[in-house]
Image (cartoon, grey):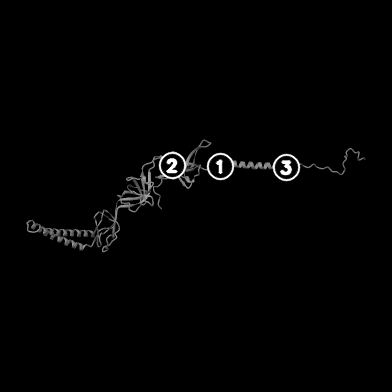
Amino acid sequence: MNIVTEHKISGEPIDTKARRRPVRPVLWFIIVGTLLGVLVGGLVWFNYFRGQMIKQFFANNKPPPTAVSAAEAKSEVVPNLLTAVGGLAAVHQVDVSADVNGRVTEIKFEPGTHVDAGTPLVQFFDMPEQGDLANYKAQATVAQLSLDRAKQLASRQFGPQATVDNAQAAYDQALAGIAKTEAVISQKLVRAPFSGDLGVRKVEVGQYLTAGTAIVSLTDLSELWANFTVTEKDSGNLKVGQPVRLKVDAYPGRTFDAKITTIEPQVAADTRNIRVQATVANPEKILKPGMFVTTTVVLPAKPAVITVPETAVDYTLYGDSVFVITEKKEEDGKTSLSAVRTFVQTGSRVDGRVEIIKGVKVGDKVVAVGQLKLQSGAPVSISTDPAPQIPAQPPRY
């Protein structure tokens, strides 16, 4: 057999084996890229799906509206008031004392009682003066007899006119002695200078007192003065006769009426304040001198202003604000309420209401109670319960 001429045998050597074709690297990159693309796409789709589900969850699970009490901003005339602090003083008050030295022999009053003007209070020892008075009275009697006799003789031309003059002088001296002694005796009996209430007794029977020593205090409580000060800026609004409202700590929630009776004509150089005095009637005698008093002067009325309840205003370091209730329609056609924080400029505060200078219009509804648990834009519902009343005086503990 001729190997060369065999038609099925190629020209290659017999020992050469057939080799496989290698897989191209591009195919591996396509497979790996496809797998990574599917993985990344799945993660992106999962995050998107999770976000949509979270958004849908919160959109369908809104918190319930917060129940609050609402009030309407009103336009009203606010009283124009000027508030100050001061104290009460008695119109008539004195420490009763004696004009002369002496020893107390009798005390004629009871401490804490009411006495009229001229009521005897304390008797000093006056026996020497009583003896002098009797002596002068006897001298006056003799002098008067001598004067009458001298006048009769002179009228008949039996005696000189000089005798009449001497008798008249002796009689006048006796009367002067009587008047002087009676004045000294009256000083030995201390009387009430005016009607009023007595205080605590400060002397005892047998005690020797010098002139000016306090015996007992005497105070007329029927009328008192309320003394207070105002700034130089506010003094131009004050006039004599303006009404004043007084409040004292001893009687919370009660107001006493007074009127300005005196305005100091000069400004204090150290404080730049002016002292004002108002007179208040005290028929019940419940007000006492020395009490701390809050005074409110009623000034002429101002034009109408916008006011809201005092509880509606939130006072912070960043400014004063209120929560204004607004209405908006949802996609389903329903109406919802939300509270939006609005910064305002406040003015005076009177009787539980605050003057709003800027930030709120007439008719706006504001949150009166419950704003502490709100955030701006939070949904709210108006409670049917009435808002709590503001007390005239904070409770005492």
Q: Which numbered dot is residue 178?
A: none
The image position of residue 157, as x and y in percent, is 7, 57
Instruction: Give the distance between the C-alpha atoms of the residues marked 1 and 3, in whole angstroms.
Output: 43 Å
Q: Mark 2 points at which residue?
A: 357
Q: Earlier in the sequence, mark 1 or mark 3?
A: 3
Quarter residue 197 falls in: bottom left
What's the amino acid at mark 3? Phe
The image position of residue 117, as x and y in percent, is 25, 54
Front in this rendered view, residue 313 or 14 = 313
The image position of residue 54, as x and y in percent, is 58, 42
SS category of the residue bearing label 2: strand
Q: Name the residue under label 1.
A: 58
Q: Mark 3 points at which residue?
A: 29
What's the amino acid at mark 2? Ile
- The answer, for residue 145, to whether it is visible in the render is no
Please give the name of the residue rendered at 20% of the width and 63% of the height, measured from the top-left corner: 128
The image position of residue 166, as x and y in percent, is 13, 59
Instruction: Give the distance between the C-alpha atoms of the residues marked 3 and 2, in whole angstroms.
Output: 74 Å
Q: Which of marks 2 and 1 is nearer the N terminus?
A: 1
Q: Nearer the viewer, mark 2 or mark 1?
A: 2
Q: Left or right: where does residue 322 sit relative to residue 262?
A: right
Classify 10 Å Cα crowding around label 3: few (below 14), some (14-19), many (20 and above): few
